Image: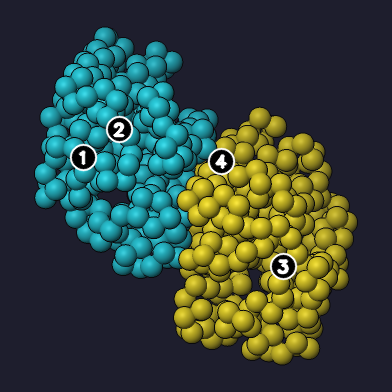
Chain colours: A yellow, B cyan
């Protein structure tokens, strides 16, 4: 559990929890437990995705994948342990003044966005895609759920830590949905064009595994335009007036647009 | 997810949630969401335990195991989905009048008893045991956590649904701890002496896999005496006066003592 959790990475999801909470005036401390929870869920999903029965990847974040170091059984259990323990951290938010009803909403949404109707469902659709069932609509479903849902969860949960009202949570959800999709399309672009050293993993892996991607259907140029368009939508959602201080959220959206890893 | 969830089984853990809630005067309806949650956690653990990298079992409850039907990738994801969705059902208890603070305690305990310090930790220790590291104390740890913890969770969570006070929750925990250990020792005994048709799985699998068990260390006769002793302890805990109606809990303890599958 520690090996994969401490292997680095961008920490995008915890950053989003904290940035969303702070954008509504909440303290960073109050957002940290939920930030930890979502990073644990993200990390478990990477460990399981890398397994031989799934994507069969040997490297992740520039280090050998969990099962290469600890074996498959321990890697499965490390993932199970991280996923289960994540809910402990979600509940911890109650110790920082977040009302019990809001904490329950966070727990419910972690389950929903992380579960069969969310991330796990997206991953299952991705596995089916490897069997040649993918069309553009199917790919959209995969992107929305496999990557997007946990990003939406992160900003919404940060909003709940910040006691956001319905309009604020909606603005954050629109922001999260847009950057989530942009993030995944950018991932697909980097898999085609990126620098292996910076990425910490092999490029062209989608092509080699016969996976269809956004650039596969829409071309590289249109994919880049779509990332830029989604970034604008995300920024507009949080700069419309409902979010008191959207500056960090805007910074993160711009960073994701320009990232090379 | 449905295939394994609907494959039958004793439904011991949900029965315990409901029996514990009813023993304190709560309605069965209020206990059902948590009962579903714990069965989903139990079922996910079976799916992952049966995987080739873990126990490599082909049959469970008389049917082909999940990965034999759906493949390893989908079996891993079915387990992940069940585990994640379980927390949705735990939160559902709030719709049946269970106070938010009690629901949060249930969520936290589902994470704790099901996670790295609980069931997942027990399973990890069991995997290590297959590598020849087991002694009697290690085996005790495996039993307490791999099987016992989720049973303890079940009766305690039922107690929380029933608005149990500290003394009542303690009585239920003592009951759960005792029948949980008795249950696992009985499992080990049945693996040695049971009827494959009734069990729905191969016997002697522990011996064949080189797993040490309670009867291995203490003999069959002493193992049977221990099951009887633990059953007495369990019944005494709930018939001491703090639990208004312990009749179903007593019935379940007696049933477990006599079961042949």
The residue identified by callout 2 is B213
Tell me whether marks 4 and 3 sit on the same chain.
yes
Pick the residue in front: B153 or B140: B140
Can you name the residue that lies furthest to the top here?
B240
Judge depth for marks 4 and 3 and give the one in front: 3
Residue B58 visible within the image:
yes
The residue identified by callout 3 is A201
Q: Is B226 placed left or right of B161 in the picture?
A: left
The residue identified by callout 4 is A85
Q: Note whether A261 is above or below A44 in the view shown.
A: below
Describe the element under mark 1 as helix, strand or loop: helix
Marker count (numbered): 4
Q: Mark 1 to mark 4: distance in Å?
A: 32 Å
The residue identified by callout 1 is B191
Q: Note whether B246 is above or below A175 in the view shown.
A: above
Judge depth for marks 1 and 4 and give the one in front: 1
User: Label 1: few (<14), some or many (≥20) within 10 Å?
Assistant: many
Residue B110 visible within the image:
no
Provide the chain ID for the residue under circle 3.
A
Pick the residue in front: B87 or B45: B45
């Amino acid at each position: 559990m520690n090996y994969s959790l401490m292997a680095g990475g961008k920490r995008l999801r915890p950053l989003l929890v904290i940035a969303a909470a702070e954008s509504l005036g909440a303290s960073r401390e109050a957002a940290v437990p939920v930030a930890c929870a979502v990073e644990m869920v993200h990390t478990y999903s990477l460990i399981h995705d890398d397994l031989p029965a799934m994507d069969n990847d040997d490297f992740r974040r520039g280090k050998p994948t969990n099962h290469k170091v600890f074996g498959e059984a321990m890697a499965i259990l490390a993932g199970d342990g991280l996923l289960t323990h994540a809910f402990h951290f979600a509940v911890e938010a109650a110790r920082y003044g977040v009302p019990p009803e809001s904490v329950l909403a966070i727990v419910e949404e972690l389950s929903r966005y992380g579960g069969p109707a969310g991330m796990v469902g997206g991953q299952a659709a991705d596995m089916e895609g490897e069997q040649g069932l993918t069309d553009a609509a199917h790919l959209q479903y995969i992107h929305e759920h496999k990557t997007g849902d946990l990003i939406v969860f992160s900003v919404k949960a940060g909003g709940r830590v910040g006691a956001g009202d319905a309009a604020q949570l909606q603005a954050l959800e629109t922001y999260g949905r847009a950057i989530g999709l942009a993030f995944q399309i950018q991932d697909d672009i980097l898999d085609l064009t990126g620098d292996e050293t910076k990425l910490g993993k092999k490029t062209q892996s989608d092509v080699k595994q016969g996976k269809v991607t956004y650039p596969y259907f829409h071309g590289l140029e249109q994919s880049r335009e779509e990332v830029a368009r989604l970034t604008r939508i995300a920024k507009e959602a949080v700069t419309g007036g409902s979010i008191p201080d959207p500056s960090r959220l805007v910074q993160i959206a711009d960073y994701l647009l320009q990232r090379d890893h």
